[in-house]
Image (tube, grey):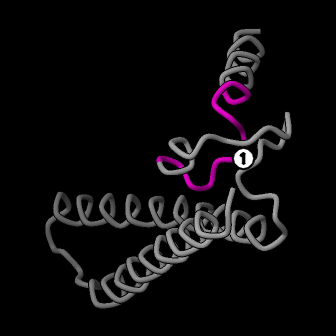
């Protein structure tokens, strides 16, 4: 991968991370202001369900941020864009679709097949 491509993916990762952090700040602000006490049990249950869903989504995004940070470290150390399993380059199209990818398409398919076989046991 050339320097221009690395810079492109670094910028893409940084922008993605910033978008997630911005959404998280908005959610936090929303949850702090959304402290109404609903007199109706159905309204209260609906509000609690919405809050739980928001928090679950934020937890997934927190995990995604750690994957983005790991990808940024790989950009810095020169290992970004190479499959962790085979050492072969990961296709640009795959990285465009999933910039945090650590496995090539073939290695990911093998991993998923092994996971499916072991899950059935």
Q: Residues within 10 Å of mark 1 (few under 14, many from 20)?
A: many
At a point 25% along the width and 66% down the height, the residue shown is: 47
At a point 72% along the width and 47% down the height, the residue shown is: 102
Q: Could you say which quadrant of the image residue 29 lies in? A: bottom left
Residue 118 versus residue 79 in the image, above or below: above
Residue 86 versus residue 65 in the image, above or below: above
Task: Tell me residue 74's x, y (percent).
Answer: 78, 64
Q: Is residue 120 left or right of residue 53?
A: right
Q: Which residue is nearer to you in this view: 84 or 21?
A: 84
Q: Is residue 102 left or right of residue 14?
A: right
- Give the residues drawn in magenta, as a range: 97-108
Residue 102 versus residue 5 in the image, above or below: above
Task: Tell me residue 72's x, y (percent).
Answer: 69, 70
Q: Which residue is nearer to you in this view: 56 or 69?
A: 69
Task: Tell me residue 16's x, y (percent).
Answer: 47, 70
At a point 57% along the width and 65% down the height, the residue shown is: 9
Q: Quadrant of the N terminus?
A: bottom right
Q: Could you say which quadrant of the image residue 86 lies in? A: top right
Task: Tell me residue 31's x, y (percent).
Answer: 35, 81
Q: Would you name the residue on which mark 1 appears?
A: 102
């Amino acid at each position: 991968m050339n320097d221009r491509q690395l810079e492109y993916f670094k910028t893409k990762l940084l922008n993605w991370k910033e978008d997630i952090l911005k959404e998280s700040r908005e959610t936090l602000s929303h949850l702090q202001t959304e402290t109404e006490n609903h007199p109706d049990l159905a309204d209260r249950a609906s509000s609690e369900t919405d809050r739980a869903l928001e928090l679950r989504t934020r937890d997934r995004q927190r995990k995604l941020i750690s994957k983005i940070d790991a990808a940024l470290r790989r950009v810095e150390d020169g290992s970004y864009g190479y499959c962790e399993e085979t050492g072969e380059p990961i296709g640009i199209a795959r990285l465009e679709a999933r910039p945090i990818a650590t496995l090539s398409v073939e290695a990911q398919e093998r991993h998923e097949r092994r996971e499916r076989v072991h899950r059935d046991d």
